Amino acid sequence: MLCPVWRLEAQAIPAQVAPRMEVTLEKQDGGRWKAVDPGMVFEKDDRVRFRFRANFRGRLYVMNYGTSGAYSLLFPREETGQENRIEAGKEYRVPATEAWFRIGGPPGYDVVYWLMSPVALGASELAAPVPPRKPQPPKTLLPRCDDTLFRARGQCIDSSAGPRLVPRGGALPENLANLPDADSRELIIMRKPDGFSVSSPTPLAGPVIYEFRLAHK
């Protein structure tokens, strides 16, 4: 269904400031965009996009490994915007254009990889995206609504969807796995009904990767 990864400039984060990024998942509803729970279970053909804000400068890349087994770069590219430079404190949108991401493919979980780096990465380091070398969870795993959350929020929420740390030694697309010092590191993920934040207790010294599991029927 989707396709993305990130990139950030050197000398972007003062040593005393903890790197932090806030992300909001939005769904188009009746011609308007509304923030939804990161664990929301989407229907086929739903339209979604992300908003984000960081407290550091850099560049952003987003990649997707879909339930169909297809792997693609969501951002940056021609359809979603080719300017991926970010500035501290400014809100951005992915896609950066008037486009959106449409939910498709077999029911399950798309795995959206986000890469953050305090140093510039060459194009060759992110080239030739391919599926992970290790198998993903069986495609028979289907999203399920948490009855308690459904009643409380009026949405179908799957508590296993949303932002997740990449386990040490976990499966990664080959081009990401080959990045120097690529790791999920000591990241802290805080979830809210209308978004989430990812932060690091220490200044970034290399590329940092986390994933977002997008659930859909």
Image (cartoon, grey):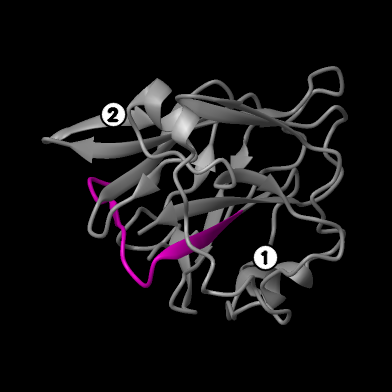
- Which one is nearer the viewer's eye here, 137 or 55? 137
- Asked whether, in this view, residue 142 is left or right of residue 183, the answer is left
- Where in the figure is residue 202, as x and y percent of width and height? 88, 30
- Please report whichever mark, 1 or 2, sits nearer to the chain's N-terminal start: 2
Vertical comparison of 49 with 188: above or below: below
Q: Does the magenta run of residues contain 107?
A: yes
Q: Residue at x 75, y 43 (%)?
A: 118
Say which residue label 1 marks.
122
Find residue 56 and report its image quarter.
top right
Indicate the position of residue 190 as horizontal and vertical percent values.
66, 27
Identified by mark 1, the residue type is Gly
Q: Position of residue 177 (x, y in %)?
A: 77, 70
Q: Quadrant of the N terminus?
A: bottom left
Check disc 2 and report its element: helix, strand or loop.
Answer: strand
Mark 1 element type: loop
Where is residue 132 drawn, in percent x and y?
67, 77
Q: Which residue is mark 2?
A: 34
Numbered range of the magenta stretch: 95-113
Is 104 in the magenta?
yes
Q: Amino acid at mark 2?
A: Lys
Which dot marks residue 44? none
